[in-house]
Each structure stands twice: as C-alpha cells, then as structure tokens.
Image: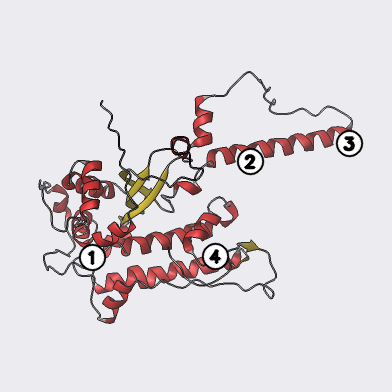
Amino acid sequence: MIRLASSSVTLSRGVNRRLVRSISYVLPTVPTLENLRASKKGFDGLFSAETLEELWYKQGQHIVDKLNSQLSQSSVTNPPADLAELITLTFSKPQLQAIYEKALELHNLQFALESLKPNDQGNAKIEKADALALLQTPTIQTEFPNEPTSPELREWIVDSFGSIAEFRTLLLNNAKGIKGNGITWLVAQATYSDSAIKASSGISTPEVSYNKLAVMNTYNAGTVDDSIRSGQITKLKEQKKAKEEALKKRQQERQEIEGSQVETTEEAPKENSTTLGTVEEAEEAFSYSDRKIMPLLAIDASMKVYLPDYGVFGKAQYLDNLWDCINWDVVASRAPKRFKPSVAFDN
C-alpha cells in the first residue's frame, strides 16, 4: 500500500481548520527512480532521462499539487495517509469526484512504474518511429527475453492463458487497443463466491481464494478494485427512489397549502408482493459482490507516456521495450496464494 504522510483515518468536511490538523500529500519515493535520477541516467531500455523526469517528477508532482488543492477546495481535513484508502472513501461521493480522480491517477502511475526495472542489455530501440512502423508485419515468436522467473507465477500464467507467448500477445494487444489514457492490468481473480466458500467450509469469514489470472483495461480514472464498485447500480436506484419520494412529499405539501389536487408527471409503480423481480435486478444487486480482484502488474498505455521518446507511431516499439523491463520479482511478490481445486471436473 502507498503511504504518503501520517494522519487520522477519518475523512471530514467543513471542520474548523484551527481545531483539526489537515494534511498535504507528497510525491511518493520510488527507490529505482531515485537512483536513476541521482546518476542522471534515463530508464535503460525504456525512457530517456528527460522523459523520466517529466513523467514522474514533473507530472507526478503536478498530480500531487492538484490533489492537495482539491482537498483544500472541498474543505477536507484529516484524509487518510494511505492513498488507497482515500480512493475507497471518495469513490461513491460525487462531491469529491475530483479528489478521487487525482488520487487514483497518482496511485496507478506509481503502481505502473514500480512494476518495471531498467533493461541494461543494450538491445532496446528508443527512437521516434515513422508511419511505416504501422505497416510492419508482426513477428511470430514462441520465446521472449525477460520471461517470468518464478515457477509458481509462470505455471499460473500458463494455466490461465495457454502459454507465455499467448499471455504476452494478449497483454500487449490490450495495451495497443487503448486510445487516450488507460492502463492494462494483470490481475488475480477469485471467481468462487464468498457465499459458496462459507457454505462448503463452514467458516464465517473464509480467506478469499484466488484461482485465475486475467487481463483487463481501465480508462482515465478507472479502478480494478471491485470491492468499492459493488452495489453501485443499487445505490443509484436508491438515490432515484429518494428523489421521487422527496418530490411526492413536496407535491403533498403543495396540495395541503393550495387545497387542490396536484397532478404528478409520473405514476408511482404499484407494488406486487407476488413478484420476485427480474434477473437483471438480481444481477444488479449482486454485481461484483462475490468477485475479488488483486492487481499484479500495470502497463501504462497512455499517449503521454510513450509519445516523447517513441512518437505518434511508436506505441508498438514502446510496448515491446516495456515487456523487457517488467520486474517479474515485484509481480510475483504481489501475487496472492493460488487456490487449486482438489477435485477435477470432466467436461
């Protein structure tokens, strides 16, 4: 988790600033980037020194400054020191949307950069490509440099995607398909529902069982954390119902004052106790509630990342270089314990 400063874990607004200590976030320290900056070197195999300075130390600091500014404008005091917790607390609060977006932007950028290591093999091509790069036929390879070294992670990838080559193709093609700002993620996914685990194990709070790896994209201020998205459709419907009830109350008040019937623009639906509801309503109520996702790897496919060194037509070369810079030791350290069913089912 990312800790930027120390503070209380409450999120309050409109509190007397003389009584409550506020907080200012600072740019997190990434040891690999600090060492490269001290040696005045670029990110070998991926970024020039100028791009690295712009990407993290200038753009990253700009995000931090905007985040602190939004906290001040929204009169938020004592935000949590953990950036991930700030994201969770502000996700479902429309009035704090700007804070959520900047906090997530900083979190994702750091997560992506911490997934990488310099490639000192000297075989990377870092230059701006011309339009002919779009016409090049992709080469078919079955082995690549910088494959995962952890036996457990490698086995999990092969079981989930078929082979390392298929996984690499899926991962990089997903990133190529992003237009604008976005990130491609490798995630561990728990596809067994909590309720099923509880029923079979007899444990009230069982450990989440991650059994599958998946690749997914997020765009702009998108998050892969399903736990904070659970029940969002239901919450929106509850908000709509509350607005309708408030409107009905105001109409009743007007009727009492004017002494006449006030026409409503929409007839309230009649409740039917024999109706169980639709399949769609059931899915909306339980969407994401039983699916757990843990991010392991993030590839930033935004134009602002590759444009300075690779140009408009150089995204494919950037992604090829990025694969060679993935720090698989970091990815493996983020991976949860894999759950393997003890019983195999025949198709």
Looking at the rendered structure, the kind of residue marked 2 is: Gln
Count all numbered tags in the image, as a single digit: 4
Distance between mark 2 and mark 4 Cα atoms: 27 Å
Q: Quadrant of the C terminus?
A: top left
Looking at the rendered structure, the kind of residue marked 4 is: Pro
Residue designated by label 2: 239
Q: Mark 2 or mark 1: name the one nearer the start of the chain.
A: 2
Distance between mark 4 and mark 3 Cα atoms: 48 Å
Does residue 222 lie above or below 248 as drawn?
below
Q: Mark 3 or mark 2: name the one nearer the start of the chain.
A: 2
Residue designated by label 1: 309
Specify few, some or many for label 2: CA neighbours under 10 Å numbering under 14, 14-19, or 20 or more. few
Looking at the rendered structure, the kind of residue marked 3 is: Ile
Residue designated by label 4: 80
Q: Residue at x 41, y 49 (%)?
A: 224
- Mark number displayed over residue 118: none
Q: Residue at x 28, y 77 (%)?
A: 35
**SS state under label 3:** helix
Q: Residue at x 55, y 56 (%)?
A: 89
Q: Are marks 2 and 1 in contact (CB under 8 Å)?
A: no
**SS state under label 2:** helix
Q: Residue at x 54, y 68 (%)?
A: 69
Observer-side mark, 2 or 4, equals 4
Observer-side mark, 3 or 2, equals 2
Comparing 68 with 50, the one in front is 68
**SS state under label 4:** loop
Specify few, some or many for label 4: CA neighbours under 10 Å numbering under 14, 14-19, or 20 or more. many
**SS state under label 1:** helix
Observer-side mark, 4 or 1, equals 4
Observer-side mark, 4 or 3, equals 4
Where residue 271 sits, quadrant-wise, is: top right
Q: Are marks 2 and 4 in contact (CB under 8 Å)?
A: no
